[in-house]
Amino acid sequence: MRLRLGVLFAAPVSILTGLFYVLPFWLLGWHRYIGVKSSTTGKSKLGTGMVWVVDEAKAPKWLLARWVGWGGHCVGSFVVLRKMPEQVTTLNHELHHVHQMHTLGFLQPVLYALSSLTAFAAGEEAYKANHFEVAARRVAGQVADATSFTQGYAWCGKSHR
Ligand SMILES: [Zn+2]
């Protein structure tokens, strides 16, 4: 029931990204659908989504060039991965973003942007110090945030370790 409500809450984002990104790229053969996946961490209760992988043989070079340095991303209730996952780490990271989408719904992208903005204003890297990224990295068992581990956060002049 909670997952269904989450999918509904995220639907405005899922419909937009699905219609203008995931569906056309899938129809063009650039994304290969691998199925509905659920997080294996036990910490992303609503982390269930439809997953695609970029098809390297069919995707155009400009698209592959845009993926350099990235493992995957979450768009609404959907996940697109750069490669077929050998380990579940990247998939669990992205499925935690799906959990965030299903918890915060269409507000998630707004709050994500605000988190990047506040991290940037605090002098940290907007992506690495973003609260949603730190949480996803922590849940997936990745290094959560190297900068903050060594220097602490700097919010409103206070340092938090
Ligand atoms: Zn992430």
Image (spheres, rainbow, N blue to C red):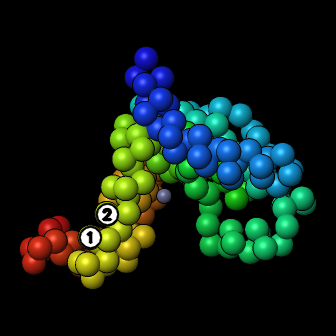
Q: Which residue does the numbered mark 1 point to in the structure image? A: 118
The disc at residue 114 is 2
How packed mark 1 is, by other alpha carbons closer than 10 Å (few <14, some 14-19, many 20 or more), is: some
The image shows residue 3, relative to residue 93, as above or below, that is above
Amino acid marked by disc 1: Thr
Asked if residue 117 lies left or right of residue 41, the reply is: left
Q: Nearer the viewer, residue 104 or 41?
A: 104
Q: Quadrant of residue 19?
A: top right
On the image, the x and y values in percent for residue 148 come to 28, 72
Amino acid marked by disc 2: Leu
On the image, the x and y values in percent for residue 3 come to 46, 25
Please, what secondary structure does the residue beneath circle 2 have? helix
- Is residue 3 visible in the rendered image? The answer is no
Q: Are marks 1 and 2 in contact (CB under 8 Å)?
A: yes
On the image, the x and y values in percent for residue 30 come to 82, 55
For this orientation, the residue located farthest to the right is 57
Could you tell me which residue is drawn at 36 percent across and 41 percent down?
Answer: 104
Asked if residue 138 lies left or right of residue 97, the reply is: left
- Is residue 69 visible in the rendered image? The answer is yes
Query: Is label 1 within 8 A of ligand 1 (CB to nearest ligand atom)?
Result: no
The image shows residue 134, relative to residue 46, as above or below, that is below
Could you tell me which residue is drawn at 83 percent across and 72 percent down?
Answer: 61
On the image, the x and y values in percent for residue 112 come to 38, 58
Could you tell me which residue is drawn at 32 percent across and 71 percent down?
Answer: 117
Please, what secondary structure does the residue beneath circle 1 have? helix
Quarter placement of the N terminus? top left
Could you tell me which residue is drawn at 50 percent across and 40 percent down?
Answer: 12
Asked if residue 143 lies left or right of residue 23, the reply is: left
Q: CA distance from mark 1 to mark 2?
A: 6 Å
